[in-house]
Image (cartoon, coloured by chain):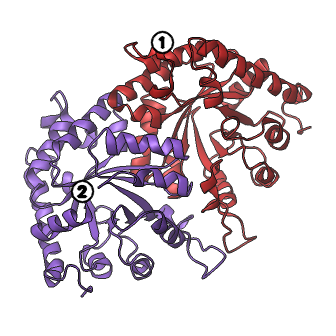
Chain colours: A purple, B red
Amino acid sequence: MTRKQLVEQIYSKGSYLCVGLDTDIEKIPECLRKEPDAVLQFNKAIIDATLDLCVSYKINTAFYEAMGSKGWETMEKTVAYIPDTHFRIADAKRGDIGNTSSQYAKAFLQEMPFDAVTIAPYMGADSVKPFLDFDGKWGIVLGLTSNQGAGDFELRRLEGDGSPLLYEEVLRKASQWGTTENLMFVVGATQPEQFERIREITPEHFYLVPGVGAQGGSLKDISKKAMIADCGILVNASRAIIYASENEDFAEEARVIAAQYQYEMLQYLLPRIGTIGKEPV
Amino acid sequence: MTRKQLVEQIYSKGSYLCVGLDTDIEKIPECLRKEPDAVLQFNKAIIDATLDLCVSYKINTAFYEAMGSKGWETMEKTVAYIPDTHFRIADAKRGDIGNTSSQYAKAFLQEMPFDAVTIAPYMGADSVKPFLDFDGKWGIVLGLTSNQGAGDFELRRLEGDGSPLLYEEVLRKASQWGTTENLMFVVGATQPEQFERIREITPEHFYLVPGVGAQGGSLKDISKKAMIADCGILVNASRAIIYASENEDFAEEARVIAAQYQYEMLQYLLPRIGTIGKEPV
């Protein structure tokens, strides 16, 4: 999916919501657990219930790997079920030496119809670049994450020109490895005080923003601080949506929560409608 | 596998060799490709041919994921085929927020019989700790990697006490999250000039050392600089061993190369035999 196509989806739906399918077999409703592939049935119901309210789905690979090769198959079937109108993210946080990263890129961007993969940047340029070689596909590099451990390394200050924080240096360097058409960054919603600085370094990039909902980040804060003319953010909510109810009405309740997010997002998007391609408001 | 058991294997075999099963379907001999699970047949032949010469196998998950759910199944069958006398490493470079890292740990250390998983440390403590919660299992945190991209962030200097390089700070911090009995570090063989400093920071930890062979690192250099009384290193070679021949004799030729490594390793181990538990020579 190109940036233009993604932005068209966002403005036509009034939503920059990404629904995170971190589906844990132990947390899905009792009524589904006897199904032959309960996780797939759960995912399909969530997708059906939220399709018109979101522009993206994010599959957290860990939850599928924990179920072994059958889980990987469930992931394959889930991503195949998502229509190509939606931006399909493999939240895999991969990254390795070049020839290995190429294999990861192949797994998600070629063998499966994902539009994007999240990437851990620790190993540098040759671990990131192989993900950026696919037309209409994206690499999403971890910038500043939403967890407490972000303080251990990401928020440490480096010596040298301007003494950047490590995550700032990751944004600066990685933005040279790709373009605003094939590279995004993960920026956690729990760090709104950093967003001004983040937009300074990467004024035109899209961000994937986790941490709203279960992790406590504010949709208003990050929308106010990070939105640009063509939106430039995808906000992910996982647990808050998919586990909205433990009962048979889980899909309806997921839709209720997704609709709340979409309604709030529409308010932030409205002043910008018609500004695409112009300066941010 | 406990440290004691691993060290017993090393000293009884005169080897600290880890054979890397980065098996690429496009690189295995023609004669095997028609088999129903060619990669598994290839791996079994390599394992049979090298079992007495090495103490560990490392499965590079990327190469299996690139084959989809069938590839994941091949990985499951491969690790199940490796006897539990050998230290089984999932070279997966995972790491995410706590609840997600727990799922990755479950995938490799509980659902599959791996003894260890490699971990990317960018996201900090809560992304690493869930891998350290399994008796007799290990997390192997990326310290200094063998690729060129290591210069982008790992070798950058941080402000603060002693101005450590980023990777030095990773070693220092992460070594507090686990013990020398459940935590190792990845340290690339292509950076021998860093080994003295690395041993200063983590004098007692085991290192997994990739980069010998195809990537150009010297076995002699790293053995001289990083070995401690109970050995303390596992040296990995992947492509140099498994692709020693493109023909039907691939397993015999893999054995020849593995035997060369083992013979050289024995020379470095000999002066230390009998010193286990005493000061390094």
Q: Residue at x 46, y 33 (%)?
A: B63
Query: Mark 1 belongs to which subunit?
Result: B
Q: Is residue A48 above or below residue B32?
A: below
Q: Residue at x 64, y 23 (%)?
A: B244
Label 2–label 1 contact, CB within 8 A: no
Q: How many marks?
A: 2
* Amino acid found under the numbered disc labelled 1: Cys
* Residue corresponding to mark 1: B31
* Residue B271, visible in the rendered structure: yes
CA gap, disc 2 to disc 1? 40 Å
Image x and y of residue A194, in percent: 43, 78
The numbered disc on residue B126 is: none
Q: Is residue B48 above or below residue A196?
A: above
Asked whether B143 or A42 is in front, the reply is B143
Q: Could you classify mark 2 by the number of other residues whose Cα lies within 10 Å: few (under 14), some (14-19), or many (20 or more)?
A: some
Q: Residue at x 28, y 72 (%)?
A: A232
State left or right for residue B82 relative to residue A139.
right
State left or right for residue A217 relative to residue B151.
left
Q: Could you classify mark 1 by the number of other residues whose Cα lies within 10 Å: few (under 14), some (14-19), or many (20 or more)?
A: few
Query: Mark 2 belongs to which subunit?
Result: A
Q: Secondary structure at mark 2?
A: loop
Asked whether A40 or A88 is in front, the reply is A88
Image x and y of residue A163, in percent: 61, 79
Image x and y of residue A110, in percent: 32, 42
Which quadrant of the structure image shows residue A230?
Answer: bottom left
Asked whether A277 or A87 is in front, the reply is A277
Q: Is residue B227 above or below residue B13?
A: below
Which quadrant of the structure image shows residue B259?
Answer: top right
Q: Nearer the viewer, mark 2 or mark 1?
A: 1
Q: Quadrant of the C terminus of chain B?
A: top right
* Residue corresponding to mark 2: A1
